[in-house]
Amino acid sequence: MSKLARIIRMEFRLTAANRLFIVLTMLGPFFIAGVALMPSLISGSAMGGPETRIAIVGVETHFIEAMSGVLATSRIRCVPAEGSTETLDADLLAGVFDAYLVLPPDIGRATLLELVSRNAVDERAAGMLRAVIGQVIVSQRLVSAGIAAAQVASLTRSPELHTRQLTARGEKKSIDFLSILMTGLVLATLLYVTVLLYGQAIGRSVLTEKLSKTVEIMLSSVQAIDLLFGKILGKAAASLLQYGIWVGLSTIFFRLLGPRLGLSITLGLSTATLGYLVLFFILAFFLYCSIYAALGAASQDEQHLTQLTWPMIVFLIIPIVMISPIIGAPRAPAVIGLSLFPLTSPIVMLLRIVVGAARPWEIVSSILLLLAAIAGTVVLAARIFRRGLLMTGRRIKLSEVLRLAR
C-alpha cells in the first residue's frame, strides 16, 4: 500500500502542480458559464438585431395592421407588397425585404400558406407568423359565423400554461425546459470534457514513460497493477479537486454576479444532482481511464494511440450530440438502453436524472452495470498494461491488444 500511495501522490502532484492544470481550473467556470449562457446570448442578439422585414401580398392593409402590433415585439415588421412571383423573388434576392408571404383572397378558408425567405431556415419568424396569422384567421371565421367582434378576443384568448414537476417528496416545483436543457448541457459537457482530457492524459503519460524507458525502472520496484491504479487514483484526486473549484466558482458566479449582470439563466443544481455528478464521474473516470492506460501501454507512438482510442471517443460523443433528444424523450427505449450501456450510461443516466425521468431501479441497474464493467475492464487492462509496457519496436494492432487481454 505504501508504494501505491506514493504513486498516487506523485501523479496528483504532477497533475495539480502543472501550470496548464491551474490555468484550466481558473478558466473552467468561465467555460461553464459560456456553455450555459451562449444560447440565451445568441437569442438575445437575435432579438436585439435588425428587424426582419416580411412582405405580405394579397390582403388588405387592415389585416396587416392587425398583425403588426404583436409581431413588432419580436422585431418582425410586415409591409404590404404587390407584384408577380418573379418580381417578389427579384426583390427578395436584392434585399428589399427578408421574406414574403402570399395570402389567398379568401383568407378565412386558407389551409396552407407558404413563406419564402432568403435564409435556409427562419424558424423564429415562421413560428411567430404561424401563430399570429392563425389567430387572425380564426377571428375572422368567428366574425363571419355571426359572433360579435367584441367577443372574439375573449373567445380566442389562449390560457397560460405553468409547468410544475412533482418531486419524490411530494413537492411541486416550477420548471422550464430551458433551465433543464442548460443544466443537462453543462453537466454533460463537464463530464465529457474531464473524462476525455484525463483519459487521454493517462494514455499519453503511460506512452511517454514507455518510450523513455522510465517505466522499466519503475517496474523494477513496483508491480504493474500498482502503477496502473496509482496513475488512475492520482489523476482522479486531482480532477475531483478541479471539480470542486469549478462548481464552487460557478455557483458564486450564477448566484451573486448573475443577477447584477442581468443574467436570468438558472441551473437546477441540487445537492442530489451534484452527488450523482460526482458518482458518475468517478465511475466513468475509472472505466475510461483504465482503457486509456491499457491502450497507452499497447501503443508505439502518439499517432498509434490516437488510432486505438478513437472508438472510445465515439461512445463519449454520442450522448453529447443527443442531449436535446434525450431530454425531450427521456423514457424512449433507445435512451433507456443508452443509460444502461456502460460506455454511454454516465452521461445519459445523468441527463435522465436531471430531467427526473430515471426510476430508482434504473439508476441502481446503471450503477451496478458500470461497476461490473469497471471490474472486467480493470482485469483486462491490467493484463494489457503488464504485457504491453515492455513491448516495443513494432506497432500492435487492435486484434493483438484483444489477444493480450486473454
Image (cartoon, rainbow, N blue to C red):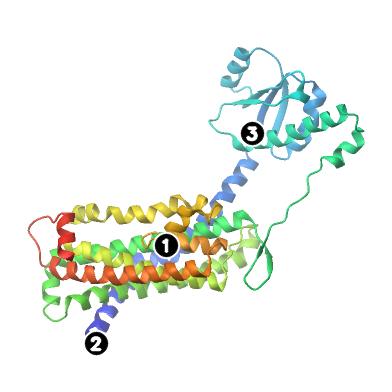
- Label 3 or label 1, whichever comes before in sequence order: 3
Rendered position, 150 above or below 353: above
Residue marked by disc 3: 126
User: Nearer the observer, disc 3 or disc 1?
Assistant: 1
Q: What separation in Å lies between label 3 and label 2 (alpha carbons)? A: 67 Å
Q: Is residue 29 left or right of residue 152?
A: left
Using the image, tell me which numbered label, if any, was put on residue 340: 1
Q: Secondary structure at mark 3?
A: helix
- Label 3 or label 2, whichever comes before in sequence order: 2
Q: Residue at x 50, y 59 (%)?
A: 186
Q: Is residue 311 left or right of residue 58?
A: left
Residue 179 in sight from this viewpoint: yes
User: Nearer the observer, disc 3 or disc 2?
Assistant: 3
206 or 226, which is in the foreground? 226
Q: What separation in Å lies between label 2 and label 1 (alpha carbons)? A: 37 Å
Q: Secondary structure at mark 1?
A: helix
Name the spot of residue 387 as percent of width and height, x first.
13, 68
248 or 27, which is in the foreground? 248
Amino acid type at image mark 1: Leu
- Quadrant location of the N terminus? bottom left
Q: Are marks 2 and 1 in contact (CB under 8 Å)?
A: no
Residue marked by disc 2: 2
Q: Are marks 3 and 2 in contact (CB under 8 Å)?
A: no
Name the spot of residue 306 as percent of width and height, x first.
24, 54
Amino acid type at image mark 3: Ala
